[in-house]
Image (cartoon, helix red, strand yellow):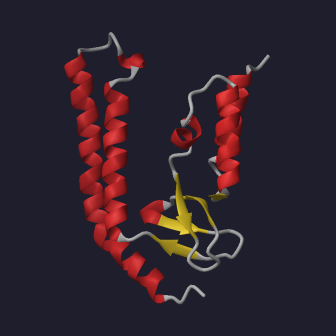
Amino acid sequence: MTSPASLARLEVGRAGREPFLPAERMAELEETLVNSNHRRGAARRLLSSHLPTVCPRCEVSGYYRWHFLGRFSHPACGYRWAVNPCRYLARQVGWGATSAAKLSFDPANAGQGGLGESVLGGCMLGLFRVPVATLLLPIQSVIWLMSTRADPK
């Protein structure tokens, strides 16, 4: 028999594949996880690839899924756009720091090496993501400029 907590995580996992989540759906997923003994904010952590944004064409606000090079798409109106390069780089640095912290303090790694080794490994993983994002920044800038030149309305 499956526990309510794992069913809630499964529901959130399915929602994570959707390109757009209305704010009401995000609140509903959060409430589902809280009712199954997860901490508040768990839905936003599990759906960290979805960012609160507004569609430039139809002005519908909600949580849009972050695609490669900071692209978003709204399935209802079919519009696709990209984030500006500053937000792209800031998000990559944030994700690098988050992944480093997760690896450094993962209880599954406890006892397999010293704390220094796991911290060093986490920092290497986090520091690897920033140079890659910096190398992709010119490409992302071109994509952003092309998406801003198209008239959204």
Q: Residue at x 65, y 54 (%)?
A: 23
How far across and how far down the image is residue 81, in percent? Answer: 51, 74
* The quarter of the displayed image where residue 61 is located: bottom right
How far across and how far down the image is residue 102, in percent? Answer: 38, 31
* The quarter of the displayed image where residue 134 is located: bottom left
In terms of depth relative to the viewer, which is nearer, 115 or 40? Answer: 40
Q: Residue at x 68, y 68 (%)?
A: 75
Quarter of the figure with the N terminus: top right
Quarter of the figure with the C terminus: bottom right
How far across and how far down the image is residue 77, in percent? Answer: 69, 76
In terms of depth relative to the viewer, which is nearer, 131 or 48? Answer: 48
Q: In this view, does 47 lie to the left or right of 110?
A: right
Q: Residue at x 36, y 63 (%)?
A: 87
Q: Residue at x 45, y 88 (%)?
A: 149
- The single residue placed furthest to the top in the displayed view is 111
Is residue 119 positioned above or below 152 on the image?
above
- The single residue placed furthest to the right in the displayed view is 1
Is residue 94 positioned above or below 59 on the image?
above
Label count reads 0
Is residue 68 positioned above or below 143 on the image?
above
Q: Is residue 38 left or right of residue 112?
A: right
How far across and how far down the image is residue 54, in percent? Answer: 56, 68
